[in-house]
Amino acid sequence: MRFVLIFFFFGSIFVNNLTAQSQTQFSTKSKKAILLYQEAMAQANGYNLEKAIRLLEEAVKEDDKFIEAYLFLGEIYGDNHQDSLGIETLRKTIQLNPTFFPPVYSNLATLEFNNGLYAAALEHINTYFSFSNQNPKFKKDAENLKKNCEFAIDAVKHPVPFKPKNLGTNINTKYDQYWPSLSADEQTLVFTVMLPIDSTNPNPYLNQQEDFYYSTFEDGQWTKARPVGPPLNTYGNEGAQSISADGKFMVFTGCNRKDGYGSCDLYSSKKANDRWTMPKNMGKPINTRAKETQPSLSADGKTLYFSSTRPGGKGGLDIWKTTLADNDTWTEPVNLGDSINTLKDEQSPFIHPDNQSLYFSSNGWPGLGRADLFLSRKIGDSQWSKPKNLGYPINSHFDEQGLIVNARGNTAYYSSNRLGQGRDIFTFDLYPEIRPIMVSYMKGKVYDAETKLPLAAHFELIDLSTAKNIMDAYSSDDGTFLICIPSGKDYALNVNKKNYLFYSDNFTMSVGNFTEPFLKDVPLNPIKIGEKVIMRNIFFDLDAYALKPESKVELNKLIVFLKENPTLQIEIGGHTDNTGSTEHNKKLSDDRSQSVEDYLTKNGINPKLITSKGYGETQPIAPNNSDAGRAQNRRTEFKIIKVH
């Protein structure tokens, strides 16, 4: 109600002066027009805008030069979402007397800007600044408006590629659909729908509630959306959700609930046996007496971003983050700071699975409308780059919020009402400059290699260049898993479970374009004599036996395994392809396996528990007639040879 409040201040001066002095302060001599004006002010104070508008329209009919009534009417038109009439009426006041009320230029410019009339808005805000003695309370807003006008005019001159596509009638209906969230494999879409509570109630604002719907991607299209159902959907409002990369964990916003800490809190639920568990309030320190809303969960499930009005922020709604500690509790949330947050509102954060690219909406950074979409990239561990406006026409004079990006980084999903009657979900291709790092994924099932029964196992994805753990997750009770693998680096994957040998894999993602996922089941062998593990992250230079530095990641995992299982005696086996002579390959494999043994014993493993042997080319696991086959045969293994 910004416009009305501004005018109420001046209107009260007029009324007080009328009582104390005379009616000559008004631009009209009509007593009837003045009475209508005064009654309109009383109605507006009671937020009865429709009645106030009718009274003011009558007042200007009584005197079509009653400038105070035009001023008031123009402001209320704006507050009542009748922007065209508001603009027309405020322009009329300027025609009647260009210097009567200088703030009218700022208020008019705001309405024009909100409707995409950027050049007119800039002209009027510049006129506002030509007057002296601007009210300091509103001058800062006017300065920001001028910056926005200048930015918008330039952005419209340099449009970015944008071809939005409606997701169609299986997703979008006559109701509002918004807040899309997507699993990393792009097979599950969850979104919020605004539904009527009672179809006979004519007041939409008192007759709405939000529910979750979902759709799956089958045979090249999205299936007919279905309600998620209880216990997530209730008779109250639940929305602004974020689902995990595997689609089996959800964080969402619930407002005005009995177990709430504030007006809106964050809740979580897990999916087990195709049903969602009873939602739990995430509690302190995430939720406070303030408003917590619009969560975004990182692909590894370890960091949660959200918007909040909690104390310690920069302005209205700020973006905060919390991380999951080793004891499975969330840490005290941290404000993302001045590089993201402003004195106004930052909302709808979305952290891409690359864990480096943060998309969000803001009305505090220069933009084209009420709220624009921005991208910021992580610098180091905790800093963020200056936000980049996604550009026109992705952003417009409408309110853009709730954008997400698929794991591959080429496609965005968002909700908009500018291309239809209600809010529908659209998709569009991202132009290169605003794409995140492309992320692939590995998807499959963990199972016992002997019984074939599913296993809940621990996954670790490790950056081989830094030995930093970038992902820590578990497969579900049914053994299924999905882990995100960012491009641009090389990784070691370790899958482990107590009483089983670990599984090792390698992902070389530093070169190439990875558009296809890795679909692979993971068998885990029980610990027993004779079982082997291929260690796919032990590296040597060509025809050399010195361990390369990145081998330490895998070797350190083996050390942990041996210390956790001190009764095991193992053999390190070295293997080569058939390139070169048999004698040379035997010696090379002997030397390589010995290098591994030496590393283990130098790092605390009892030498009596380790032997090493080179097998050369004698035990191939693939044909040696291709580069791929020969690469598989060049390997290091360990085998259980005794259990003490």
Image (cartoon, helix red, strand yellow):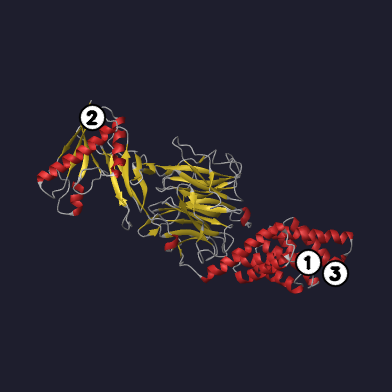
Disc 3: which residue: 30
Q: Seen in the image, is 496 located left or right of residue 210?
A: left
- Asked if the residues shown at circle 1 and circle 3 are in contact, with their CB atoms under 8 angstroms apart, the answer is no
As shown in the figure, which amino acid type bears the numbered disc 1?
Glu
Q: CA distance from mark 2 to mark 1?
A: 94 Å
Decide: is 497 above or below 144: above
Query: In the rendered structure, which disc, 3 or 2, sits on the residue that comes first in sequence?
Result: 3
Looking at numbered disc 3 in the image, what kind of residue is underneath it? Ser
Disc ID at residue 68: 1
**Mark 2: few, some, or many residues within 10 Å (few <14, many ≥20)?**
few
Residue position for label 2: 607
Is residue 551 visible in the rendered image? The answer is: yes
Which residue does the image show at 33% across and 46% down from the upper left?
464
Q: Nearer the viewer, mark 3 or mark 2?
A: 2
Q: Residue at x 59, y 50 (%)?
A: 317
- Which of these two is toward me, 11 or 582? 582
Question: Upstream in the sequence, badge 1 or badge 3?
Answer: 3
Distance Cα–Cα, label 1 vs label 3? 13 Å
- Of the numbered discs 2 and 1, the one sitting upstream in the chain is 1
> Which corner quadrant of the image does residue 429 belong to?
bottom left
